[in-house]
Amino acid sequence: MRSIIKYNNRKLYDKTTKSYTTLEKLRGLIQIGEEVEVIEKKTGSNITTKVLFQALNFNDFTKTELINLMKGSTNEKTNSFNAQFSFYGLY
């Protein structure tokens, strides 16, 4: 499992690579099936869900796709989204 630390200045630090990372890189990890855990440095709280929502932002979906996703309709893009979120218990 990839462990990410989120600092107060919003920077994300990947403990595996020992370097700072971005939401886009985090998204790429999730899309290839990497398990990720994000811990807030200040509180020690697990904020994986919050950060995953940011990383897997809804801007990639058209309005129709979002409506269909909420209704339970599926296509290749929503199937991928559902798989990623159900893996993390978010959906």
Image: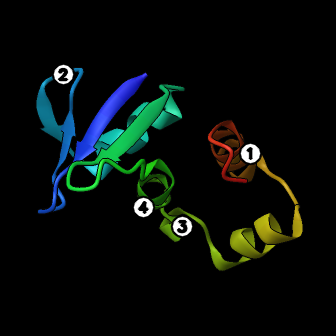
Residue beneath disc 2: 17
Amino acid type of disc 1?
Glu
Checking the image for residue 58, the label placed there is 3
Give x and y (percent) for residue 6.
24, 50
How many angstroms separate mark 4 from mark 2 (CA)? 21 Å
How many angstroms separate mark 3 from mark 2 (CA)? 27 Å
Graded by Cα atoms within 10 Å as few (under 14), some (14 to 19) or many (20 or more), the crowding at tag 4 reads some
Q: Is residue 58 above or below residue 46?
A: below
Residue beneath disc 4: 54
Nearer the camera: disc 4 or disc 3: 4
Nearer the camera: disc 4 or disc 1: 4
Q: Quadrant of residue 14?
A: top left
How many angstroms separate mark 1 from mark 3 (CA)? 15 Å
Residue beneath disc 1: 76
Graded by Cα atoms within 10 Å as few (under 14), some (14 to 19) or many (20 or more), the crowding at tag 3 reads few
Residue sitting at x 48%, y 62%: 57
Q: Secondary structure at mark 2?
A: loop
Nearer the camera: disc 1 or disc 3: 3
Give x and y (percent) for residue 66.
70, 71
Give x and y (percent) for residue 1.
43, 21
Amino acid type of disc 3?
Phe
How many angstroms separate mark 2 from mark 1 (CA)? 31 Å
Q: Secondary structure at mark 3?
A: helix
How many angstroms separate mark 4 from mark 1 (CA)? 21 Å
Amino acid type of disc 2?
Thr
